[in-house]
Image (tube, grey):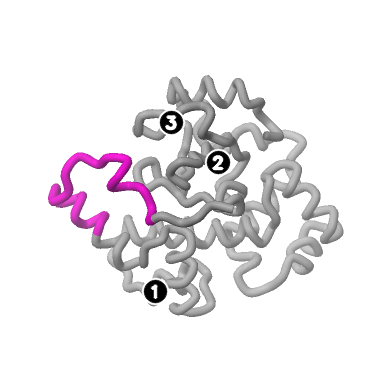
Amino acid sequence: MQMLDAQECERARITRDSRYDGCFFTGVRTTGIYCRPVCPVRPARAVNVSFFPSAAAAEAAGFRPCLRCRPEAAPFSPAWKGSRTTVERALRLIDGGALDGSGVEVLSHRLGIGTRHLSRLFQKHLGASPIEVAKTARVQRAKRLLDETDLSMAQIAMRAGFGSLRRFNAVFAEVYARSPTELRKRASARSLGRLGPPTRETDRPRSRSMP
């Protein structure tokens, strides 16, 4: 962790301290998923968790997003304010689609710094590369559209910044181990009360061997 130490993260995780929401994410090795510190699921044993400074870092380590606490809905971390203005500006540009159709070189040029320096800043503050962060941003953008709109899959893929519907489906299968259609059906069923009380088992992504 770059901004929080492990003991502080552990205290926040166990108490579900909302002040830390968006500041870090917890990967649970026994389930292969990662959560926000405010996740309502019973906390896993400390020996089975790892902490990450960003959702992209957790995904790069092989974890999948929790379907209960929805990491894509986490607030922007206030710990990134102040001297981290370059990273903050880069994140705004990425969230606006700066890497959807161009490379890191174009982004670093817009920021007025070198590509290597930008990558070092991302590793320091986010634990992931700009490309990994951009991938997570696209998936999170699409997940919000799936949950909150009635747009077609093709429209969601386009608005979220995916180059094609095939790529959109492939990335969702990789990140969630479910297709976008399955996730939308699940959200619709829950909103209509057709799903029982969610449990860790129902929210656990399909098994995947961890590195």
First of labels 2, 1 by sequence position: 2
Instruction: Classify mark 1: helix, strand or loop.
Output: helix
Q: Residue 76: which numbered mark, if any?
A: 2
- Amino acid, disc 1: Gln
Q: Are marks 3 and 2 in contact (CB under 8 Å)?
A: no
Q: Residues within 10 Å of mark 1 (few under 14, many from 20)?
A: few
* Residue beneath the point at 57% across and 26% down: 9
Marks 3 and 2 sit apart, C-alpha to C-alpha, by 24 Å
Q: Which residues are magenta?
A: 186-206
* Residue beneath the point at 43% across and 44% down: 31
| 4 to 90, vertically: above or below | above
Q: Residues within 10 Å of mark 2 (few under 14, many from 20)?
A: few
First of labels 3, 2 by sequence position: 3
* Residue that mark 1 sits on: 155
- Amino acid, disc 2: Phe
Marks 3 and 1 sit apart, C-alpha to C-alpha, by 38 Å
Quarter of the image for residue 1 reads top right
Marks 2 and 1 sit apart, C-alpha to C-alpha, by 26 Å
Instruction: Classify mark 3: helix, strand or loop.
Output: loop
- Amino acid, disc 3: Ala
* Residue that mark 3 sits on: 44
- The answer to which of 140 and 6 lies nearer the viewer is 6
- The answer to which of 150 and 210 lies nearer the viewer is 210
Lateral position of residue 169 relative to residue 60, left or right: left
Quarter of the image for residue 115 reads bottom right
198 in the magenta segment: yes
Q: Position of residue 207 (x, y in %)?
A: 41, 55
